[in-house]
Amino acid sequence: MSVLAVVDSSNAREETFPPLSILVLHGPNLNLLGTREPGIYGSIRLADINDLLLEEGRSLSANVSAVQSNHEGALVDAIHDALFKHQGIIINAGAYTHTSVALRDAITGVNLPTVEVHLSNIYCREEFRHHSYIAPVAIGQISGFGAKSYLLGLQALVYHLRYS
Ligand code: DQA
């Protein structure tokens, strides 16, 4: 049990929260971050994003586990495995965002609150990237803030789990 100091404009108070456990899923080609299309995705590596997520998780009293796979079935399995282990999911499904009914069904199947994130703003890019199979079954989507999209997604998910 960790203690989080919450300061608001009227009174400083302390709230205790049981730690949460969050699964972060990275889809295909995200292992190439750092060298992959840096003009679109920046130069940050996936390992650095995971480090930032762990750090942000610590400050939010949330344990973060990150998994990357280039295989749709492996991502489906990871979503199934999240049941009873994690309270929520952050997913950047990469190109599967725009193609995968299987990932969408896995998310609805486990019924865990899920936040969809993208480094790039998918709505400013090619038309085929404008549609997400995941968005309608996610609690929300964050797109376009580079690595920060993941951190914002984690904050939003933790807020949702604690206060909704
Ligand atoms: C992406 C956007 C997708 O369209 C693309 O296929 C990716 C990365 C992003 O994070 O901006 O692989 O999900």
Image (cartoon, helix red, strand yellow):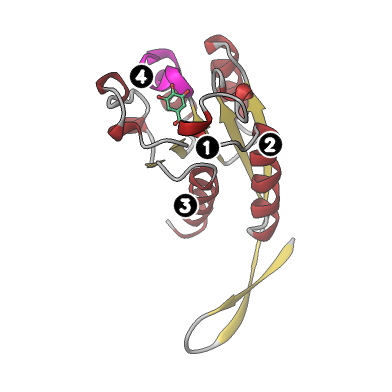
Of the image marks 1 and 3, the number of the one nearer the N terminus: 1
Q: Is residue 4 left or right of residue 75?
A: right
Residue assigned mark 3:
156
Quarter holding the C terminus is bottom left
Disc 3, SS: helix
Residue assigned mark 1:
90
For residue 11, above or below residue 37: below
Label 3: how many Cα within 10 Å (few below 14, some 14–19, many 20+): some
Residue 2 or residue 115, whichever sits in front: 115
Kind of residue indicated by mark 2: Ser
Of the image marks 1 and 4, the number of the one nearer the N terminus: 1
Q: Is mark 3 within 8 Å of ligand 1?
A: no
Residue assigned mark 2:
65
- CB of mark 4 within 8 Å of CB of mark 2? no
Q: Is mark 2 within 8 Å of ligand 1?
A: no
* Whole-number angstrom distance, CA of label 1 to CA of label 3: 10 Å
* Residue drawn at x 65%, y 51% as measured from the top left: 57
Residue 31 drawn in magenta: no
Q: Is mark 4 within 8 Å of ligand 1?
A: yes
For residue 148, above or below residue 36: below
Quarter for ligand 1? top left
* Whole-number angstrom distance, CA of label 4 to CA of label 2: 24 Å
Q: Main secondary structure of the magenta part?
A: helix
Kind of residue indicated by mark 4: His
Provide residue 108's location: percent of width, then percent of height.
41, 26
* Whole-number angstrom distance, CA of label 1 to CA of label 4: 16 Å
Disc 4, SS: helix
Kind of residue indicated by mark 1: Ile
Disc 1, SS: strand
Provide residue 60's location: percent of width, then percent of height.
63, 58
Range of residues picked out in magenta: 94-106
Residue 79 or residue 148, whichever sits in front: 148
